[in-house]
Amino acid sequence: MISLLQEAAHTAAEHTESVASSVAHGETETATGLPQLDLTSFGNQIFWLVVAMVVLYWVVAKVALPRIGAVLSDRQGAITGDLMAAEEFKLKAKEAEAAYDKALADARAEAGKIVAANRAEIQKELDAAIAHADAEIAARVSESEGRIRQIRDSADTDAREVARDVTAELVRTFGGVVDQAAVDQAVDSRMKGALQ
Amino acid sequence: MATEAHGEATGLSFHPMDQFIVRPLFSDGPVHWYTPTNVTLWLAAIVLATLALLVLGTRGRAIVPNRSQSMAEMAYGMIHKMVGDIAGKDGLKYFPYIMTLFMFVVFANFLGLLPMAFTVTSHIAVTGVLALAVFLTVTIIGFVKNGTHFLDLFWVRSAPLAIRPVLAVIEVISYFVRPLSLSIRLAGNMIAGHAVIKVFAGFAALILINPGLGALVTPVSILAVVGMYAFEILVAFIQAYVFTILTCVYLKDALHPSH
């Protein structure tokens, strides 16, 4: 490629030689052909280009790219880390929800159990109280019956006594002698069946 | 040149090629290979600009980047993706070389657009060396990685046997034309755009010589300079991109020569 250019630049080089000489004489510099084809400047351009490229390569490859690459991978790491943390938090939230639901269900079951137990206890107490009341009522009834019987018995004896006394007084009044045994017998025979 | 003859007749001076002259920085003497020249200055500017963007710009190493770090990361991401997509995973080994090439060409093109600047990529000596370096590197990688299988690149097995020799000749020619087209495409774009801007700028001075005609020509030529400048900004990026993407394509051919 260089040889091709050399041929093409042959005429241009002649022009630029005159330019160079005019520069040397301190005149205003003017390009008469393509300065790109001035082969006298090629060595200079290539030398400085190689120097610049070596420095630039060192800057880019050894300093800039590792740094930018590190920043980008750090950012990627941070993003994936955050996403993973978010995923973890989501899982934790789900677990907490499940635990909450379970606790709620447990509490409900416990409450049901307590209610049932209380109901049973109250029922037992109620049954006991009813039985106690029934027993008391029965005792009162039997006691009342006893007293009624007593009252009836006492009424019977009182009536006999009154009848005997009345009979004895009647006998005495009519001038008779009171035969206590006969009076009792008569009263008893008359009373039999009356006070039933 | 025709423009110069025309310019002398009307009093306008056109020197569209003066911006490409290689001048010594500190003296008027001849340009030796070691002489610091405007090429040296603008090469240094390219290195410093790359340093500023990729190193100073990322010194915060922030998880949430600032503007300059974002730009550096975007450049990194763009070229990294380009190498990965085109040359494949095994091509990523050469990512630093391709990133260096891209940063060099893109900053050379953009810094060259500054007024009074010197565009190093407008010189065939510079783009030629870059293209030859790519060509030689890729050819060496091709032979080292694939041995003689690298020659499969020129032997199109998917084509009928009869036309394979013809295709092989075409493939060989196109392979050796690569560095030429790669360097001339870049330098040619830069030369043409910058020269056209200078020519339009030369016409803009017409109002000083001929106010009647200049009243019409000067605004048009200034608008044309602005338009060309905007277009050149686009071209500066596109040419850097094209240079880099073609390098990736050549690298792909070297790593995977079978069609």
Image (spheres, rainbow, N blue to C red):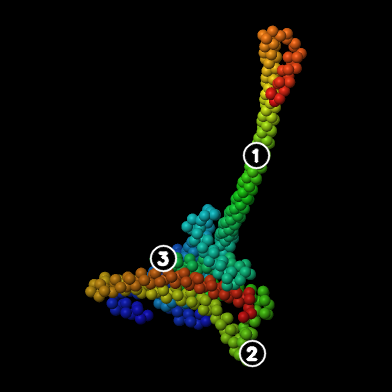
User: Which residue shows up at 58% across the image and 58% down it?
Assistant: A76
> Please, is residue A109 above or below residue B189 in the view?
above
Q: Secondary structure at mark 1?
A: helix
The answer to which of A28 and B209 lies nearer the viewer is B209
- Name the residue type under label 1: Arg
Mark 2 surroundings: few (<14), some (14-19) or many (≥20) residues within 10 A: few
User: Which residue shows up at 60% across the image and 50% down it?
Assistant: A97
Question: Which numbered disc, 2 or 3, marks the residue closer to the eye?
Answer: 2
User: Mark 3 = which residue?
Assistant: B114
Specify the farthest residue to the right. Answer: A181
On screen, residue A131 versus residue B135, left or right, reads right
Count of numbered labels shown in the rendering: 3
Specify the farthest residue to the bottom. Answer: B162
Which numbered dot is residue B34? none
What x and y, as percent, mark residue B130?
Answer: 54, 72
> Please, is residue A164 above or below residue B133 in the view?
above
Chain ID for label 1? A
Q: CA distance from mark 2 to mark 3?
A: 54 Å
Which numbered dot is residue A119? 1
Q: Quarter of the image containing the C terminus of chain B?
A: bottom right
User: Mark 2 = which residue?
Assistant: B161
Residue A36 visible in image: no
User: Which residue shows up at 40% across the image and 66% down it?
Assistant: B116
On screen, residue A99 versus residue A19, left or right, reads right
What x and y, as percent, mark residue A172?
Answer: 69, 8
- Name the residue type under label 3: Leu
> Please, is residue B206 above or below residue A61 in the view?
below
Which quadrant of the structure image shows residue B195? bottom left
Q: Earlier in the sequence, mark 2 or mark 3?
A: 3
What x and y, as percent, mark residue B217?
Answer: 28, 74
